[in-house]
Image (spheres, rainbow, N blue to C red):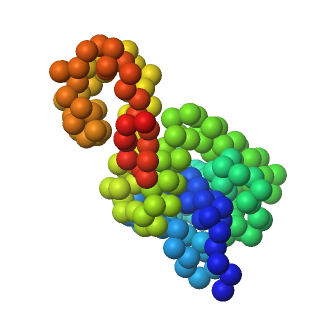
Amino acid sequence: MKKRTRLHDEAVAYHEAGHAVIAWHEGIGLRSASIIPVGTTGGRIIHYPMFQTINPEVDTGRRSRDRVEKSVRISLAGSIAQRKFNSRTYRRFHDEEDLQYAVDLLARIVGSDEALNAYFKLLYIQTRDILNNPDTWAAVESVAAALLHYRVLRGPEIKTAIQQSWDARKFNETDVSTRRQMVGGRFGWQLPVLADLHLENMSDQEVASITLKIRDGTAVLA
């Protein structure tokens, strides 16, 4: 078996991180993400079932259509994230199953090939736009880094990597007074590194000089 290169592992990590972050964005609970090869796939995510109580072929209401759209965006996110990371790592076979699943799902709720193609394009653009959002992409980078380090992440660990990336980004963009207010509140809980710094004993200049970064999905001092 050919040994995987670092670049290949990074591509897989970004692919799976794209799926995971969009699932989280869509409000779908995550069980795990992995970059350990399984069969012909380089990795996978497992999220909670989306169609246990809904059959898109029978239920044509807004709730069913909304669930289909969420599922398609999750499926499309992997290859979009991989291409955004490094387009040279992408090969068509990387997302054949994801694309086929998305097309098959959409075919259940539209009546013509023209409508299916237009619907698919719209959802692809929506997914790409979500991933191009700086906060969303920071979350993808954080989850990908954690996957590269740990290889497997459980649902709560994925959520922590996402939340810490957003909180660190917000912290770095705020002024001194706001930074002081963050500690002890939601940020103090999400970013333990802040509690360890004891900002109440630091000068404004010292507080202003703090920069956080994400390493392996965890916020640390830069």
Q: In this image, 210 relative to 5: left or right? A: left
Horizontal and vertical percent position of residue 97: 67, 70
Q: Quadrant of residue 214?
A: top left
Residue at 56% from the left image edge and 53% from the top image edge: 18
**Can residue 210 be seen by looking at this rendering?**
yes
Horizontal and vertical percent position of residue 172: 42, 26
The residue positioned farthest toward the right in the image shown: 114
Q: How many marks?
A: 0
13 is higher (above) or lower (below) than 210: below
Picture quarter with the N terminus = bottom right
**Can residue 24 be seen by looking at this rendering?**
no
Horizontal and vertical percent position of residue 17: 53, 55
Residue at 56% from the left image edge and 60% from the top image edge: 13
Residue at 52% from the left image edge and 68% from the top image edge: 35
The residue positioned farthest toward the bottom in the image shown: 1
Picture quarter with the C terminus = top left
209 is higher (above) or lower (below) than 141: above
Q: Nearer the viewer, residue 217 or 132?
A: 217
Horizontal and vertical percent position of residue 47: 43, 62
Q: Quadrant of residue 132?
A: top right
